[in-house]
């Protein structure tokens, strides 16, 4: 699945942006611009959010999260994301940026690596207290205000403000992880690595053993860990990712169905059609005709 840039990802929600490397909003609420779209997409950018009211249910890397007021979330690039449902009073401060935007004026990529939750391969979800929330909201507001200004050095000012916001969040994250359990951390690491491997190799590799070998664990251990971390089997995640790749390929009508089945390494077009029908409810031809 090809990652979506910010401009492409938000076009689904009727936002027409001038740039694709940075975006911040003061709040998404009940407006028609944020109607739930349950289709999975993959990011090529960092996504940060602070919920200020209501709630939203999201699926990120095949695990469901319920975001409530005071919850801060950080979603890394290459994550698979879909929105499941939201309440009418849902509001969130949201910041999206590409790594290249943040590091445009420096070659020091270690600046990102020192911010613990950004260097993490997984999703960060922290329930902040009232005081912590009140520290972050003015920072989100200031980034938004400066991003809309006509200052000569606007982008540089915005970058510095984003770093201020990120370091504040990193402090909350570090305090949170002090109490984290080492065993749980290892399980999350396996889950995050598995999801990344599936995203990278699912077109060619459909079998569980391949991923277990890559992670140097047994298929049984992988299956048990993924089930505990996501509520889904490892096989289900492989199939869901493969189905998503198939849908994206079918949406591009430059390839016929036989060619799509070959790209996805099915032994025959018939086997591909059976797989697609079983998991989507449509034949590949029916799916393509809907688009």
Image (spheres, rainbow, N blue to C red):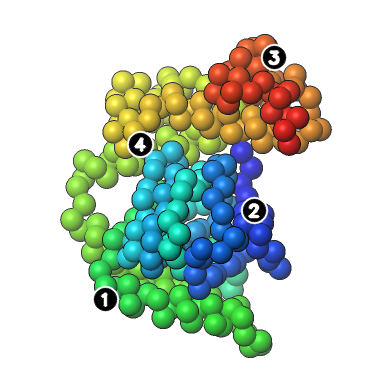
Label 1 – label 4 distance at C-alpha: 31 Å
* Nearer-the-camera pick, 156 or 110: 156
In the rendered image, residue 282, in percent from the top left (x then y), is placed at 64, 23
State whether residue 106 is above or below residue 145: above
Label 3 – label 1 distance at C-alpha: 58 Å
Residue under the image location 49 percent in, 65 percent down: 29
* Nearer-the-camera pick, 190 or 10: 10
Quarter occupied by the C terminus = top right
Decide if residue 139 is on the left or right side of residue 18.
left
Q: Say which label, 2 or 3, has the lower sequence index.
A: 2
Decide if residue 98 is on the left or right side of residue 162.
right
Q: Residues within 10 Å of mark 3 (few under 14, many from 20)?
A: some
Q: Residues within 10 Å of mark 2 (few under 14, many from 20)?
A: some
Mark 1 in CB contact with mark 4 (< 8 angstroms): no
Decide if residue 261 is on the left or right side of residue 121.
right
Q: Nearer the viewer, mark 2 or mark 3?
A: 2
Mark 1 in CB contact with mark 2 (< 8 angstroms): no
Q: Say which label, 1 or 2, has the lower sequence index.
A: 2
Mark 2 in CB contact with mark 4 (< 8 angstroms): no
Toward the right, the furthest residue is 254
Label 2 – label 4 distance at C-alpha: 27 Å
Quarter occupied by the N terminus = top right
Helix, strand or loop status at disc 1: helix
Query: Which quadrant would residue 201 be assigned to in this image?
Result: top right
Label 2 – label 3 distance at C-alpha: 31 Å
Question: What residue is pinned by disc 4?
Answer: 230
In the rendered image, residue 105, in percent from the top left (x then y), is placed at 59, 73
Question: What residue is pinned by disc 1?
Answer: 131
Q: Which mark is residue 269?
A: 3
Decide if residue 169 is on the left or right side of residue 251.
left
């Amino acid at each position: 699945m090809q990652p979506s840039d910010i401009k492409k990802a938000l076009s689904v929600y009727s936002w027409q942006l001038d740039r694709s490397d940075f975006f911040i909003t003061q709040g998404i609420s009940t407006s028609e611009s944020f109607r739930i779209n349950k289709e999975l997409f993959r990011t090529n950018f960092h996504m940060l959010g602070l919920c200020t009211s209501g709630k939203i249910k999201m699926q990120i890397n095949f695990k469901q999260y319920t975001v409530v007021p005071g919850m801060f979330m950080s979603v890394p690039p290459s994550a698979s994301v879909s929105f499941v449902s939201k309440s009418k009073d849902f509001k969130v401060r949201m910041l999206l940026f590409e790594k290249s935007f943040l590091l445009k004026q420096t070659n020091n990529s270690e600046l990102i690596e020192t911010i613990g939750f950004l260097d993490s391969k997984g999703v960060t979800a922290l329930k902040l207290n009232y005081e912590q929330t009140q520290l972050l909201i003015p920072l989100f507001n200031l980034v938004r205000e400066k991003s809309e200004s006509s200052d000569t050095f606007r982008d540089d000012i915005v970058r510095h403000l984003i770093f201020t916001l990120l370091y504040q969040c990193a402090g909350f994250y570090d305090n949170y992880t002090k109490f984290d359990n080492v065993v749980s951390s290892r399980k999350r690491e396996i889950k995050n690595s598995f999801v990344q491997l599936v995203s990278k190799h699912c077109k060619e590799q459909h079998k569980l053993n391949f991923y277990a070998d890559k992670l140097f664990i047994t298929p049984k251990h992988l299956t048990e860990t993924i089930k505990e971390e996501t509520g889904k089997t490892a096989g289900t995640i492989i199939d869901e990712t493969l189905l998503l790749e198939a849908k994206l390929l079918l949406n591009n009508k430059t390839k016929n169905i036989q060619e799509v089945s070959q790209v996805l390494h099915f032994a025959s077009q018939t086997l591909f059609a059976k797989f697609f029908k079983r998991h989507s409810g449509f034949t590949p031809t029916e799916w393509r005709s809907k688009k």
